[in-house]
Amino acid sequence: MLRALLLLIALVVPAQAEEVVVGLSQNRIAITTNFDGSEILIFGAVKREEAISDDHPLQIVLAVAGPSEPVNVRRKARRFGIWVNTDTIEVDRAPSFYAVATSDDWTKVITDTEDLRHHISIRRAIRSVGATMAGSEDFTEALIRIREGKALYQTNIGSISFEEQTLFSTSVRLPANLTEGDYTARFFLTRDGAVVDSYETVIAVQKVGLERFLFRLSREQPLIYGLMSIAIAIFAGWGASAAFRLVRN
Amino acid sequence: MQIYLPIAEVSVNAFLLLGLGGLVGVLSGMFGVGGGFLMTPLLFFIGIPPAVAVATEANQIVASSFSGALAHLRRRTVDLRMGTVLLIGGLIGAALGVQIFNALRAIGQVDLLVRLSYVVFLGIVGGLMFIESLRALRRSRAPGGVKPTRRKHGLAHSLPFKMRFRTSGLYISVIPPIIVGILVGILAAIMGVGGGFIMVPAMIYILGMPTKVVVGTSLFQIIFVTGFTTLLHATTNYTVDIILAVLLLLGGVIGAQIGTQLGARLKAEQLRILLSIMVLAVCGKLALDLLIQPSELFSVGAVGGH
């Protein structure tokens, strides 16, 4: 289906000089009870109709982004001798997961203008329009630092291996603390820092089985979920008491 | 074995949770306390979001207090009437507590509230218990008899709305037990504890209840208050993680039985001193976290109540 689509695009769109074609090892990730992170293998090729030019080599940038949501970043300060949250900045949109990978040094791969236009680097992908307070950059920096610490934000410079300017491959490690949603993977083919072609695909991350059942129940039928939790606790308490009375007698 | 918690949305080691449940279970069996005041901070330390830790711990306490209360009901050491009066206060308190919790959560101060409550209450209770048990130890060594303390006629006897509590042998006003219940309910909702460590001293010293019915009655009240708290957290915050609760439960149930056996071999005064040292240690750790400059000044949280 994907191939058919690509073929169709290739036929309809007037022949472009170079195109990026991509395949993923999986485009669905299931969060099961024993989910411990996942690794996506990505491989692709550059489709072209002319000779490879060695003077201006092609480069690849990849950005995988989780669903975005607004977040509050808070800063602590000393008040009455203890450390408490004092300042808050609301970041309008911050992806829950973000991984950038390149085939070479950042400056060789893409220009600032192109980065700004396509929101590729982590800094550009986070949007905080409302933050007018002085020093609001500190808050965005802190957000990136904290999420990098949890491997939720990753910048992997040069981690895409690019052979003969034609075949490329890389892998993206998804950590265990993923949230549900549609993750987008965007590929940019660049030359001299300018985007030549791009390609976008979706990776669906979903809780399955028991995880999905419990999560949905807790959101859609919170009363039933709460009562169920209590019932399980009561049953476990009674079971424990009965079992140990049996052991003692 | 890593396990993904569906509500907390973090992946943790299942054996770590079983072990924590077991450890706290041993301590609670040894000392006859719920263990919520130890478990909730431990859950913070292993990376469970505070809101989930508090709500889930309430659910776990339902199980441990139910199992404990059953044993007391069989021995007829539960004052059901007093328990019901305390419970009325407890339900009001829990509802208030969840409201306070949600309001502070919206402005990003819930962490501070929970930590401060822990430092204040653990400090007071641990300190008092330590002094009291040191005195008791000294008294038991000193020659000569102990002066019998006269039954005091305190506030509980002079207020209106008097009621007879036959099991406790009391004829007192219902206002003090309701107030005690409300305070404990608020604590249960905010701190994710049963509140036994506050209620037991209050029942002995403020209400003047006989020691033999105190533990059973407090356990009876705790079942319903923590059950109600669980329900409130589940319906307003969606923060009860049932998988986390079950894992902690399994460890806790086994640990509690081992703890009871261990506890039987130690003297009451020694147990009380050990418990008070432990309470003070947890209090000290939390106080240090508030006083020392944290290595990361920033924190990230979701916008709004959720």
Image (cartoon, helix red, strand yellow):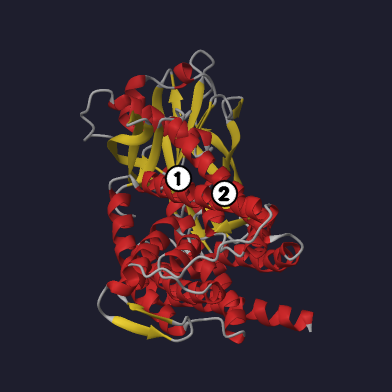
- Which of the 4 image quarters holds residue A75? top left
- In x, y percent, where is residue A70? 31, 44
Q: Is residue B146 above or below residue B47?
A: below
Residue A119 can be seen, yes or no: no
Position in image of residue B79 (x %, y %):
48, 82
Instruction: Indicate the amino acid at tag 1.
Output: Val
Quarter placement of the C terminus of chain B: bottom left
Q: Residues within 10 Å of mark 2 (few under 14, many from 20)?
A: many
Q: Chain of mark 1?
A: B
Determine the residue located farthest toward the front in the rendered image: B144
Label 1 sits on residue: B119
Of the image marks 1 and 2, the number of the one nearer the N terminus: 1
The local secondary structure at tag 1 comes to: helix
Q: Is residue A55 left or right of residue B87?
A: right
Which quarter of the image is occupied by the N terminus of chain B?
Answer: bottom right
Residue furthest out toward the top: A55
Q: Quadrant of residue B98?
A: bottom left
Percent position (x, y) of residue B96? 29, 64
Q: Quadrant of residue A197?
A: top left
Amino acid type indicated by mark 2: Phe
Q: Residue at x 47, y 17 (%)?
A: A108
Q: Are marks 1 and 2 in contact (CB under 8 Å)?
A: no
Instruction: Give me the residue at 69% from left, 55% from top.
Output: B143
Q: Residue at x 57, y 63 (%)?
A: B33
Pick the residue in front: B96 or B74.
B74
**Residue picked out by circle 2:** B130
Q: Distance from label 1 to label 2 (Cα)?
A: 16 Å
Q: Between residues A159 and B258, which one lies in front from this camera angle? A: B258
Tell me if A140 is positioned left or right of B147 in this view: left
